Image: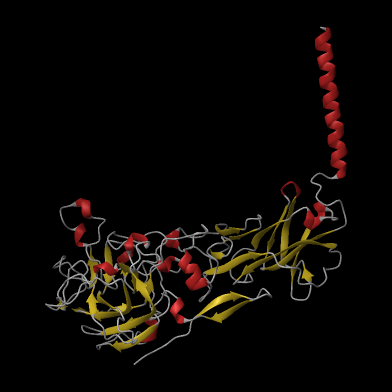
Amino acid sequence: MSWTRLVGIIAVVPSGLWLVAPLAAAEDPWADEVLDYSPVEPVNVGFDTPEKAVGPPVGAGTITPGNSSLACLGVQGGSITLEFNTPVTNDPRNPMGLDCIVYGNACFAGGDAGVKWQEPALIEISEDKNGNGLPDDVWFLIPGSEDFRYAPSPDRTEPPGETNDTDPENIMAGTIENPNLLDADPGNDTDEYYWGYAELNPTMRKYLDNYVRPDDPFHVGIDPRSGGGDAFDIEWAVDQDGNAADIEQFHFIRFRAFIDREYGTLGYATPEIDAVADVAPDVDSDGDGILDEYETRVIGTDPDRSESTLLALEIPADEGGSPYGTRLGLVEDRRGNRLELFAADPRATPGRALDTVVDILAPTDPGGPLPPGGGVKSGAVREFVSSVPDFVEAGVQPARITIAYTPLEIAGLDEHHLRPYRHDGEGYTGDGIAEVRVEPFDNRVSFTTTRAGVFILASTPGEGDNPVPVGHVYYLLIVTTALFARKLRARRAHEKG
């Protein structure tokens, strides 16, 4: 059986509106299609929708697993096979050389990274060498820390119970304390004992591009900016005889439940798959903190312009949190135009946006009048684009925007009375704009705004780029003259003495 899904990207149209435009599924980094779903009962209630294993992850952090986007394999022998329309490649530019990340619903028991609730599944990969789009080529196994082989079968039966207290080094499913913490060598306490299987590590909450950044599978805990999950290298794969697979890419990935264990009141060992991601190379051309491949494959921004990027609307607790007043992000173009976002009170609305795609553009004036008393339009027109157009409705503070203008743009206007206005589709308004600050020495105007959009500076007629008011010029001239006269008298008195 086969399932497909629709994907899209956010696109900018000339009006400044953000639309969802069709994007070929081949362009994203997630597994795209379910080719086979063969669970073995019992399957956990609500986790029997295989389509939930494609697309991006939906994590909840280290302590409480996210259970809204899982496909359960059931007990030993259950499996799911997924396809990537764009193959996952063995890319040496990837962090730590890791190529793929598997996300599930493991968690740290009581928040302790050394004790995890885990239900491992085997990982197998296959390249579509014959090009028929079917998973009928040779399959290769990721042997993992246990160095499994196809023969003898890696299937194993573990004694009933929830923990590994009775046999720390040989029980993998349940509430598992890292065996390295129980031996006599303190030097290995931060090393993971088990790695190379699905559902060993938590899936973090979405934060910027973290879902294409791998966690170090050999080190206890979750790396900062990583999405968690279980990463592996294509070079780990072995064939039926245990020899290196010697492949540089794969199109298909299969997960199989291989542990038979009954927990008691908690049921049975039943691995769940949330998502699978192609790791992005560690390349950030514009230095905006977002990896180039995430920009091009997920959010549709320009990796060569730092102002075309992604800003967080909140920072997960695991990444430091964002109490009131925390700066969530800043973008600035080469001209000095900038947009900053700051946290407001904690955001708790279900389904809220966790980030916003932003850009800074210099469009022509879309036309329409200024509000009464608004003065005369300047040539300083800027568009501050955000996929979340209303910042306050999104649960953050009004954005702090800075417009950097040139002398030519404000020619014939009073620089010290410049005011910003936002285009509302028909004309300009000052609604939602506050805390206006004119900085004539730096040729910029800053203000807060509840909404993104097209902004223009306007003022009354005046002398243009004149950083000191005329009255101030006279004052400074008088003061300077007086100081010069005082110094001259002092010099003459010194010469006479």
Residue lying farthest left? 152
Q: Is residue 477 left or right of residue 133?
A: right
Place of residue 176 in the rendered image (x, y in percent of width and height, measured from the top left): 23, 67
Q: Quadrant of the C terminus?
A: top right
Residue lying farthest top? 497
Quarter of image, res 409: bottom right
Place of residue 1 in the rendered image (x, y in percent of width and height, measured from the top left): 34, 93
Depth check, front residue: 37 or 295: 295
Determine the residue positioned at 36% across, 73% down: 88
Quarter of image, res 52: bottom left
Place of residue 49 in the rendered image (x, y in percent of width and height, measured from the top left): 37, 87
Determine the residue positioned at 86% across, 58% down: 460
Q: Is residue 170 left or right of residue 111?
A: left
Residue lying farthest front? 130
- Can see residue 230? yes
Q: What colouring style does the render use?
A: secondary structure
Depth check, front residue: 449 or 403: 403
Quarter of image, res 325: bottom right
Depth check, front residue: 313 or 5: 5
